[in-house]
Amino acid sequence: IEAPIPLKIRIYRCDKEFVLEPLDQMLEHKEIYGLIVLDRRDANIAFLKGKSIVPLVKTHSQVPGKIKAGGQSAQRYARLTEGARKDHFKKVAEYVKEQFLGLKNLKGIIVGGPGPTKYDFIEGGFVTTELKNKIIAIKDLSYTGDFGLQELVDKSQDVLSEEEIADEKKVMNQFFSLLSTKPGKVSYGEKEVMAKLQMGVAETILLSEALSDEEIDKFEEEAKKVSTDVKIISTETREGAQLKDMGRVAAILRYEVS
């Protein structure tokens, strides 16, 4: 069995117990974003998991440098450049397909890079339709490489915030819909939700950010024991304000409980 993303840690230990902490940390953020940074010479592919950038692939093209005086003809140079550019795009697209296609927890893909190369790559028919539809933002960057990946994340905070808010609204609307149609499939209030959590019937718990860190930790620890999803809901949206007024804690249950 392979981890869903590469582990950046090596542990050598003779012991009877398995070391599971790195895997637990990986599972804390189930949703990931794909990152692609490229120009005509280089490309980097990575995951964004929580706030961590996880590099996956780094590749370099054979696109020739600027033509020198007295060297090859301009026509030959143009042909070589165009051929190498297409090969570069095909190689990057293949890596993107290998890393991203079929990932159920891939929330979206963000592409960035200096100049127009990123648009040529996206609009040139190199990326599969399924993955192209996953692209949620394209950003102009000053760098490629590891600096480019960090710059891409920094410049995408607006998009990531919107995605997070949209996700919060979706799960809260699901809760309110069930509350009005199947009230036995939801629960709210700290004591009520904790009881459902300890019974193992809570599929997803919704925690208002108005809770203290200690209260959130308490619910997260219980949720981990029974594989329950945890969503932290901001108080800045209408739905988040309603959750706060309802006792700051709610749950969507695995099945109806009378």
Image (tube, rainbow, N blue to C red):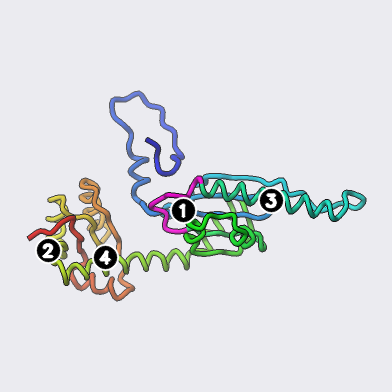
What is the secondary structure assignment of the residue under circle 4? Answer: strand
Give the amino acid type for the residue marked by disc 3 in the picture.
Answer: Arg
Residue 34, position as x, y percentages in the image: 48, 54
Question: Could you give the CA–CA distance between mark 4 and mark 3, rounded to whole angstroms?
Answer: 46 Å
Circle on res. 184: 2
Q: Residues within 10 Å of mark 4 (few under 14, many from 20)?
A: many
Comes first in the chain, label 2 or label 4: 2
Circle on res. 208: 4
- Tell me where the magenta segment starts and ends, as one range: 98-108
Comes first in the chain, label 2 or label 1: 1
Residue 166, position as x, y percentages in the image: 37, 68
The mark lying in front, picked from 2 and 4, is 2
Residue at the disc numbered 3? 41
Comes first in the chain, label 4 or label 3: 3
Question: Could you give the CA–CA distance between mark 3 and mark 2, rounded to whole angstroms?
Answer: 58 Å
Q: Nearer the viewer, residue 85 or 128?
A: 128
Q: Are marks 2 and 4 in contact (CB under 8 Å)?
A: no
What is the secondary structure assignment of the residue under circle 1? Answer: strand
- Please tell me which residue is depicted at 40% across the width and 43% down the height of the picture: 4
